[in-house]
Image: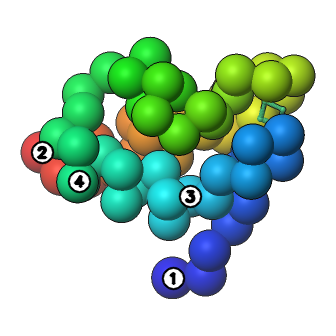
Amino acid sequence: MEERLICICNGVTDKEIIETIVQEGIDSFEELQEITGVATGCGRCKLRALDVFNSYLAEKV
Ligand code: FES
């Protein structure tokens, strides 16, 4: 899978988001934000970040 930069402000990629979900066992977007900083700057990436987060969790079930 090609890595995509999701959050420009904090340099967070989709791969990093998924790795964080797996490693930290997180289940809320807020927790993901605390750990990675994704969508805590300008907020413009929030929808993309949520999409990565929700798609991953949806596929896992
Ligand atoms: S691009 Fe993610 S907070 Fe600005």
> To which residue does mark 4 refer?
22
> To which residue does mark 3 refer?
14
Amino acid carrying mark 1 in the image: Met
**Picture coordinates of residue 35 (x, y %)?**
45, 34
Query: Residue 54, located in which quarter of the rendered image?
Result: top left
Mark pair 1, 4: CA separation? 16 Å
Q: Residues within 10 Å of mark 2 (few under 14, many from 20)?
A: few
Residue 29 shows in this picture: no
Element type at mark 4 = helix
Task: Locate residue 10 relative to residue 14 in the image: left or right.
Answer: right
> To which residue does mark 2 refer?
61
Residue at left offset 50%, top offset 65%: 15
**If you read the primary sequence from the N terminus, does the residue marked by circle 1 or circle 4 appear first?**
1
Q: Residues within 10 Å of mark 4 (few under 14, many from 20)?
A: few
> To which residue does mark 1 refer?
1
Residue 28 position (above or below residue 24): above
Mark pair 3, 1: CA separation? 10 Å
Amino acid carrying mark 4 in the image: Val
Task: Locate residue 4 relative to residue 17 in the image: left or right.
Answer: right
**If you read the primary sequence from the N terminus, does the residue marked by circle 3 or circle 1 appear first?**
1
**Picture coordinates of residue 25 (x, y %)?**
17, 41
**Among all residues in the image, which is located at the extreme left?**
61
Which of pointers 3 and 1 indicates the residue nearer the eye? 3
Tally of marks: 4
Residue at left offset 47%, top offset 50%: 17
> Is there a contact, CB below 8 Å, between mark 3 and mark 1?
yes
